[in-house]
Amino acid sequence: MTVKIPKIDQIPVEEQTSWVLTLLECINALAEENQALRDEIARLKGEKPRPKIKPSSLEGNHKKPESSEKRPGSAKRHKTQSLEIHEIVKVAPENLPSGSTFKGYKDFVVQGLEMKPHNIRYRLERWETPDGRTLTGKLSAELNGSHFDVYLKRFILYQYYHGHVTQPILLEQLHDIGFDISSGQLSNIIIENHDAFHDEKDAILDIGLSVSTHINVDDTTARHEGQNGYCTHIGNEFFATFHSTDSKSRINFLKLLQAGRTDYIINASALSYMISQGLPQDSLTLVTSKLLTVCKDDIAWDEFVKLLGIEKPLHIKIITEGALVGSLIEHGFNTDMVIVSDDAGQFNVLIHALCWIHAERLINKLIGLTDKQKEAVKSIRSDIWDLYASLKNFKEQPDDQKKADIEAQFDKIFTQKTCFASLNNALKRIYRNKPELLRVLDFPHIPLHNNTSENDIRDYVKRRKVSGSTRNDLGRRCRDTFTSLKKTCRKLNVSFWDYLEDRLSGLNEIPYLSDLIINKALNLSV
């Protein structure tokens, strides 16, 4: 049964009391939630949910270029000047009269692609020495005993991890081109014998954290073995790393920040964290009596917690998080590191900053029922973007007066009362996050948004839609590794195509990505 919700203009003006308007807001919010539940039920049944049709960008008021103006990007440039020419073909005019004079050439460059098998039969010579020994020729080291060369492996890895081509389609593609390869052999190329790549990926996080003053973080769903899991992104303008796990808790996040270390340490930093999280005094006394305790791994930590005698899950959670924070600080984690997120609770640790884009969405998604409510939303959004512009200006030229003005501007915007109850609630929620939203006033170098993580982690969203979940732990690890390497290559202006060939061939002429991260950080600090 569908209930038709009345529009505000259908209610007499004298009956449009604040209670009626608030009730309409609640009804509209429930209608949106009801439609979301209907869409979810349809998805679970294998049906298509109600489509969300966004307005076309062509419907906007776009300025049409004058007749004398050229379209963007149409300026003349030497498109083929730097191209490598592989073949030169001379073409003479047809029906050339005798006695004509040669005047040189007019070049016309055609770019093409050759995609065909190139199979080599290596005939390893066998010789018998005078003393009866048999000597046989050896294959080059880059082949490593494989029946598939570096260039074919590079193509496969590039298509799978960069092009999001699924394994069945990639296998069909290779067969169509003319390669004789089985699904098992293809799977081995995709996930087997990549220890060197895994090691380089692990070094990226360790070095990236050591040279950074802030990190952007985010997570998304990443199914594994048919079960819901999560992938956490940690990175910034220097690097990007991805870590798929079964949990997205704060404990999980702190373990990822350890960059391979597994210990727990009870020290002053750990105790400070536990106090800030409200650990009761009796539990805090028990932990303080074990100050400077070091547990080398999860097993040793579980035994330590049992000996303490603390049983409440929340208290165990707090002391575990504290011990992980203690380990981070003990191993040199930058205590001024700012963690920028979209307000997910697991990232609210150490020095935390929030994304302004996500904060403004709370206002942007509100739909006013009256002209006054619509105008209120429009006015608040305009004020927020004026404040955002002030923050950008402060980042370029920080000073104490600007800082005080911005704080006053923030208070004025988010403490005001409007005619729109939902808008007032959104303003209150944003105001509660004032310290995290204005973190840039103390750390002008950090970004005002979390777009870096949003853009980087989009690869996982696309892969989830294209190929679903990974089937084994090695496949999941390879997905994290090659996505991390690809994204980091992009940030360092390294061709991922060239990088794969360099590493697979063993040439290692491209410097290790961790070294490039250090160089980039040093160049930016100069």
Image (tube, rainbow, N blue to C red):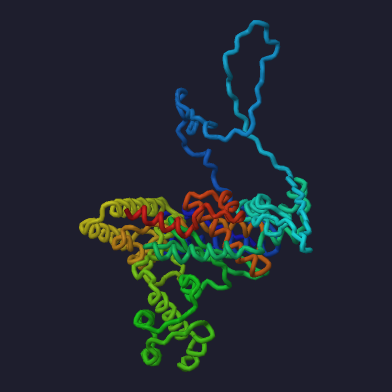
At 44% from the left edge and 61% from the top edge, which residue is drawn? 216
Q: Farthest residue toward the front?
A: 130
Given residues 191 and 456, the one toward you in this image is 191
When asked about the image quadrant of residue 325, the answer is bottom left
Residue 250 relative to residue 441: left or right: right
Q: Position of residue 304 (x, y in %)?
A: 48, 90
Q: Position of residue 505 (x, y in %)?
A: 61, 54
Residue 41 shows in this picture: no
Q: Is residue 371 left or right of residue 256?
A: left
| Left or right of residue 381: residue 483 | right
Near-viewer residue (489 or 423): 489
Q: Is 442 or 165 nearer to us in this picture? A: 165
Lateral position of residue 114 relative to residue 211, left or right: right
49 relative to 435, above or below: above
Q: Quadrant of the N terminus?
A: bottom right
Q: Position of residue 141 (x, y in %)?
A: 65, 57
Relative image position of residue 190 (x, y in whole percent): 67, 59
Q: Is residue 109 above or below residue 420?
A: above
Can residue 54 be seen?
A: yes
